[in-house]
Amino acid sequence: MNNERKRTATAAGTGSQEPVLVITGRISGGSAVALCEAITRLFDGRVSSVVCDLSALDRADLAAVDGLARLQLAALRRDRRMRLRGTSRELRELIALLGLGDVLPSDG
């Protein structure tokens, strides 16, 4: 039996408040489509940016960075922006190592 936690995403925030996409568990290659659909729904409103809360992310790895880069691409295709919040030190270092610090801005 596989006890590995699955990735989940929930959205919060309405009105003039900046929407927050909360990601928990792990980001895997297969979850990118669902995450992009979730962020697209948040952009259906009149918001220009979304915060992606990663404080409950289980693992900082290449799959996570790939998924986050895909989320940012989905945002940019709609002329919107996404920024990261609650990013672990390990994930920030991995993003910097890959040269994606400007692409995936983090509030820490």
Image (cartoon, rainbow, N blue to C red):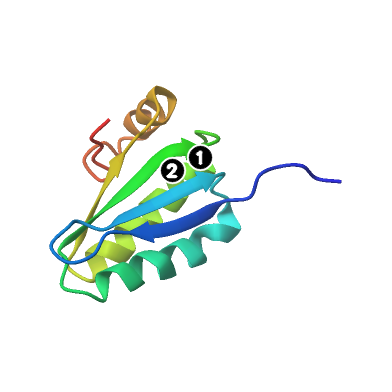
Left or right of 36 in this view: 51: left
In percent of width and height, residue 32 lies at 50, 60
Residue that protrudes farthest toward the bottom in the picture: 44
Three-letter code for the amino acid on which mark 1 is drawn: Leu
> What residue would you read off at disc 2?
65
Three-letter code for the amino acid on which mark 2 is drawn: Val
Q: Which residue is depicted at the point 66% across and 44% down? A: 5
**Most foreground residue, 80 or 10:** 10
In percent of width and height, residue 57 lies at 49, 39
**Most foreground residue, 53 or 104:** 53
- Report the quarter where the C terminus lies: top left
Q: Which residue is depicted at the point 40% across and 28% down? A: 88
47 versus 26 height, above or below: below
Q: Of helix, strand and loop, which one carries label 2? A: helix
Q: Of helix, strand and loop, which one carries label 1? A: helix
Q: Which residue is depicted at the point 26% across and 76% down? A: 44
Other-residue count near label 2 (Cα within 10 Å), few / some / many at <14 / 14–19 / ≥20: many
**Most foreground residue, 104 or 53:** 53
CA–CA distance between discs 2 and 1?
A: 5 Å
Residue 62: image tag = 1
Quadrant hosting residue 85? top left
107 versus 29 height, above or below: above
In percent of width and height, residue 72 lies at 31, 56
Residue that protrudes farthest toward the right in the picture: 1
The reply to whether discs 2 and 1 touch (Cβ–Cβ < 8 Å) is yes
Quadrant hosting residue 107? top left
In percent of width and height, residue 73 lies at 31, 60
